[in-house]
Amino acid sequence: MTETLGFQPDEVRRSDHKTVVHQHMDWGVVRAHVVKRTGLLRQETRFAPEKHALLFNLQGDARSGDDYVDGRRVAFTPRRPGSVVFLPAHSEWTGWDEGDARGCYLFVSIDPTFIEQTLGADHVRGLHPAIGFRDGMIEACLHTIVAELKNPDPASIIMAESQAVQMFIQLARLNGSGLEPLKGGLSPFDLNRVVALINARLVNPPNLNELAAEVGVSRRHFFRAFKQSTGMSPFAFVADLRLKRAVDLLRGTDRSATDIALDCGFGSSSHFAVAFKRAFGTAPSEFRRRWRI
């Protein structure tokens, strides 16, 4: 079964249902569809896209089922809102699942030629199908595509293409780990809560116990889930946020490097200078000078 221009939800994801709502947008190299269903029972999947494809669960849990990729059975992982399915062009996903009576998903197809021309064939060669994984960056890109589909304007095509490029950069980075389904990752809601707490206390960041308590899990579970959702440990994430805030202050203010260092939570201006040069290859003062030329 191949993808058609119209993308027929009842062909790709067959099910008995009471209602179906299908919104779609064609931006050329990127096409997006939001499909909502009620009265779901069992859904049967049979999909072999001619283009790269991602399916993003927006509502409803799939709690049991069977999945096959290119005819090979893979472990079924319950899919909650936020889970992602990635299918490279010409791969095949078949199977079935059962779960909530209401469901909603985003389907995105992306022209492989556009990705190869933009990123280079070497960066996307060998990408593997992945069913039901979690990644914060890819989820954010897919949410942006949903927003553009619902409220399109002349710039939407640029937004859609840029999100596609970001997703494939991240997919290429994750490919070495096999894109196995990530169990126990933080939900987007919990991750946003944690990031907001860190941002509010960047000078004196919350410790691991406080962050875990914010979402009601153990230290060990939080550390693992946070790293699965962001690709970084909490410590590395704080360091990255501090540097990003420092960059904004260097660009947008005339404050001294010492003031910026203290405002961003660095212990001293020398510590700030070392961390900044390690990350950006130049001293803070030189970065500011080049930015303002």
Image: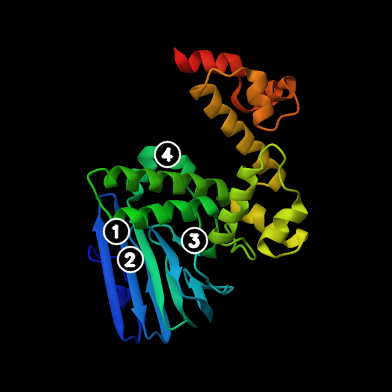
Q: CA distance from mark 2 to mark 3?
A: 21 Å
Q: Which residue is mark 4?
A: 119
Element marked by disc 1: helix
Residue appearing at x 73%, y 20% in the figure: 270
Amino acid under label 3? Pro
How far across and how far down the image is residue 197, in percent?
63, 49
Residue 285 visible (yes or no): yes
Give me the residue at 71% from left, 29% from top. 266
Position in image of residue 223 (x %, y %): 72, 55
Using residue 271 as the reference point, say whether residue 280 is left or right of it.
left
Q: In the rendered structure, are the residues bearing label 1 and label 3 in contact, judged by CB atoms less than 8 Å apart?
A: no
Nearest to N terminus: mark 3 or mark 4:
4
Sequence-wise, the earlier of marks 4 and 2 is 2
Inter-mark Cα distance, 2 to 1:
9 Å
Q: Position of residue 128 (x, y in %)?
A: 51, 57
Asked where in the image residue 210 lies, by quadrant, the reply is: bottom right
Find out whether the residues at labels 2 and 1 contact each other: C-beta distance under 8 Å.
yes
Q: CA distance from mark 3 to mark 4?
A: 19 Å
Is tag 1's residue or tag 3's residue first in the polypeptide sequence?
Answer: 3
Q: Secondary structure at mark 4?
A: helix
Label 4 environment density (alpha carbons within 10 Å; few <14, some 14–19, many ≥20): some
**Disc 3: which residue:** 129
